[in-house]
Image: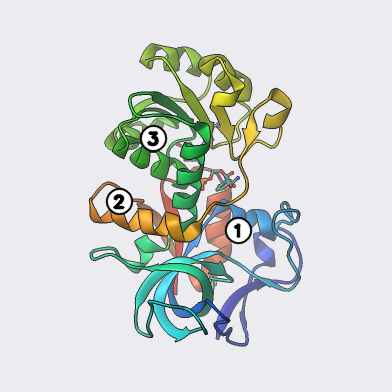
Amino acid sequence: MKKVSFAEFGGPDVLHLIDAEEPHAGPGQVRIAVRAAGVNPVDWRIREGQVLGAHPTELPSGVGQDASGVVDEVGEGAEGVEVGDRVFGEGSSTYAEFAVLSAWVRMPEGLTFEEAAGYPSVVETALRIIREVGVRPGQTLLVSGASGGVGSAVLQIARDRGITVIGTAGAANQDYLRSLGALATTYGEGWVERVRRLGRVDAALDLAGSGVIRELVELTGDPRKVISIADLGAPELGVRFSGVAGSVPEALAEAVGLIARGRLHIPVEKSYPLAEAAAAHVDSQAGHTRGRRVIVV
Ligand SMILES: NC(=O)c1ccc[n+]([C@@H]2O[C@H](COP(=O)([O-])OP(=O)(O)OC[C@H]3O[C@@H](n4cnc5c(N)ncnc54)[C@H](OP(=O)(O)O)[C@@H]3O)[C@@H](O)[C@H]2O)c1
């Protein structure tokens, strides 16, 4: 089968499309014929060797954790799933023709394979950090870096729970944030004042890692009401860095419910063929993805 792989840590050009042995479903897993793979920033962070503590990586390595496709092997003990089911979920080396998933759910009606591949990691992350920051219905949540994959999920899940959201994003994404039900303003010079004008902030999430932890603490008045997923320096300012994934099966089940009720939609910014995975990484690394980028197989 064809698979994207890298044999050394480095820039996008270390990615190569190679011929590889097909993987097989182990106990509790399924194998899918991949139709699309989600591109997450962690994919290029792993490729660069930036996150070896959290993601120990043996070389050569495959790429990707999110995918959608059609089940073609069911591992021992994997229940409630059959060959031929259309599923999306999390696994490993998903930028490939076949991949093994350790958590999955059946695709709801109306969702395309391309769209589905964009959901797993961002929904798990969004649900986790909304829970950890402890924001309640009727309160206001500030989201710094709100137009990307995680931000798009946070905004819609918070809206569904009756939480008001103020989001920051670039000028080109202001209408996008409003379309997801958020109050919107731009980041950059003067952003703290612009946020204050939009309302009182009860809790805040740093999704962009753009060096705003001090300001988020100032706006909420309490470092315990701020969480970062992108600024490793946050704990020095008393702010929690959230990096340990919660339950992916629970997140996938909740995602399906939200999608079915029309409350969650992560747009696909751009699709890339498997052979252009390096271009997908270059674009993701530029840091201005709206929704998610996906690899189509
Ligand atoms: N710790 C964890 O568990 C965990 C989990 C998932 C992701 N992450 C990390 O969290 C980050 C976000 O993930 P993602 O998938 O949402 O990324 P993404 O889809 O690439 O989105 C990045 C977003 O950041 C915004 N942005 C860029 N510069 C900004 C600035 N100076 N101020 C505010 N916003 C800015 C962009 O908005 P514009 O396009 O509008 O400029 C873009 O929408 C990544 O660094 C990722 O590695 C961590």
Q: Secondary structure at mark 2?
A: helix
Q: Secondary structure at mark 3?
A: helix
- The amino acid pointed to by label 3 is Ala
Q: CA distance from mark 3 to mark 1?
A: 25 Å
Q: Is mark 3 within 8 Å of ligand 1?
A: yes
- Residue 206 x %, y %: 55, 32
140 sits left or right of 224 in the view: left
Mark nearer the N terminus (3 vs 1): 1
Q: Name the quadrant containing residue 147.
A: top left
Q: Secondary structure at mark 1?
A: helix
Q: Residues within 10 Å of mark 1 (few under 14, many from 20)?
A: some
Q: Which residue is mark 3?
A: 172
Give the number of the mark in front: 2 or 3.
2
Q: From what the image shows, is residue 115 above or below residue 21? A: above
Give the number of the mark in front: 3 or 1.
1
- The amino acid pointed to by label 2 is Leu
Q: Which residue is mark 2?
A: 258
Mark nearer the N terminus (2 vs 3): 3
Q: From what the image shows, is residue 233 above or below residue 285? A: above
Q: Residues within 10 Å of mark 3 (few under 14, many from 20)?
A: few
Give the number of the mark in front: 2 or 1.
2
Q: CA distance from mark 2 to mark 3?
A: 26 Å
- The amino acid pointed to by label 1 is Asp
Q: Is mark 1 within 8 Å of ligand 1?
A: no
Q: CA distance from mark 2 to mark 1?
A: 26 Å
Residue 117, numbered circle: none
- Residue 136 x %, y %: 39, 29
